[in-house]
């Protein structure tokens, strides 16, 4: 006689089936992990299949003008979207990776509709109370993640433009906080401003902080 174990389906099959239950899918991405200043911004987007958006792609592969146009279109056509961030203080306190995960979790939790599954760009997942999957290069292959990457990138770029008005000596509108030669020279000349990440090496060196 077949054993009791072999005559019943394995629990793993049930779990795999549940993993792909139909429902709303949210795409999640971030902007601002690498810069020396400012918050890390994350976005979560649930697209409307009945209201498609043409031209979605990895935000880094689009012109600034195209990103701005798509930003407005995504906000208008998506079923819902949410933009969140982790502050410079949080980045310095818990490190940039954990701050990125925190911003992503905040973005998902801010969605008006609860997704059945979350698709996250990259190879790491934030702590969520819904099913989630990490997709490497998802920002170029999954429309909802592409949309999230655009919302996050435009939001952070706009933040940098505002910071540039407050601290024009650093050139934030141009380099967006990244460690360009211009930015590093400005750091040496003017020191760090309150929005610089004190735990990032070039800033730490300027502040004379030993690690």
Image (spheres, rainbow, N blue to C red):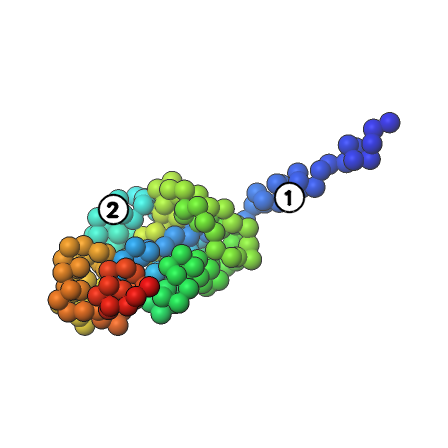
74 relative position to 14: left or right: left
Hey, which quadrant is residue 32 in on the image?
Answer: bottom left
Which quarter of the image is occupied by the C terminus? bottom left
**Residue 23 appears in the picture as rendered:** yes
What number is the disc on residue 98? none
Instruction: Tell me if mark 2 has few (under 14), some (14-19) or many (20+) residues whose alpha carbon lies within 10 angstroms of its own.
Output: some
Q: Nearer the viewer, residue 43 or 38?
A: 38
Is the N terminus in the top left, top right, bottom left or bottom right quadrant?
top right
User: Which comes before the other along the chain, label 1 or label 2?
Assistant: 1
Marks 1/2: CA–CA distance: 38 Å
Question: Please, which residue is most extreme toward the right here?
Answer: 1
Q: Can you give x and y, in whole percent of width and height, for residue 204 in the image?
A: 27, 64
Q: Which residue is mark 1?
A: 15
Q: Nearer the viewer, residue 177 or 202?
A: 202
Indicate whether 62 appears above or below 110: above
Quadrant hosting residue 22: top right
Which class describes the residues within 10 Å of circle 1: few (<14), some (14-19), or many (20+)? Answer: few
Which residue: 24% across, 63% down? 205
Q: Secondary structure at mark 2?
A: loop
Vertically, is 141 above or below 201?
above
User: Picture coordinates of residue 120 (x, y %)?
Assistant: 44, 49
Position of residue 156 relative to residue 61, above or below, is below
Q: 128 or 197, which lies in front?
A: 197
* Residue 62: assigned label: 2
């Amino acid at each position: 006689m077949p054993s009791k174990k072999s005559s019943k389906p394995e629990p793993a099959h049930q779990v795999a089936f549940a993993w792909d239950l139909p429902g709303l899918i949210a795409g999640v991405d971030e902007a601002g992990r690498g810069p020396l200043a400012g918050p890390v911004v994350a976005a979560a987007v649930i697209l409307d299949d009945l209201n498609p958006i043409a031209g979605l792609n990895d935000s880094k592969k689009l012109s600034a003008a195209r990103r701005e146009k798509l930003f407005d279109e995504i906000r208008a056509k998506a079923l819902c979207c949410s933009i969140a961030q982790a502050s410079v203080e949080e980045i310095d306190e818990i490190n940039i990776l954990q701050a990125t995960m925190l911003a992503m979790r905040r973005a998902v939790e801010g969605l008006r509709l609860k997704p059945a599954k979350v698709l996250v760009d990259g190879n790491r997942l934030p702590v969520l109370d819904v099913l989630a999957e990490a997709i490497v290069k998802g920002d170029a292959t999954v429309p909802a993640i592409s949309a999230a990457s655009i919302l996050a990138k435009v939001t952070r770029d706009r933040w940098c433009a505002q910071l540039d008005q407050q601290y024009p000596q650093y050139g934030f509108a141009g380099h967006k906080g990244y460690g360009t030669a211009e930015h590093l020279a400005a750091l040496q000349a003017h020191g760090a401003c309150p929005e610089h990440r004190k735990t990032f090496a070039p800033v730490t060196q300027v502040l004379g902080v030993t690690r």
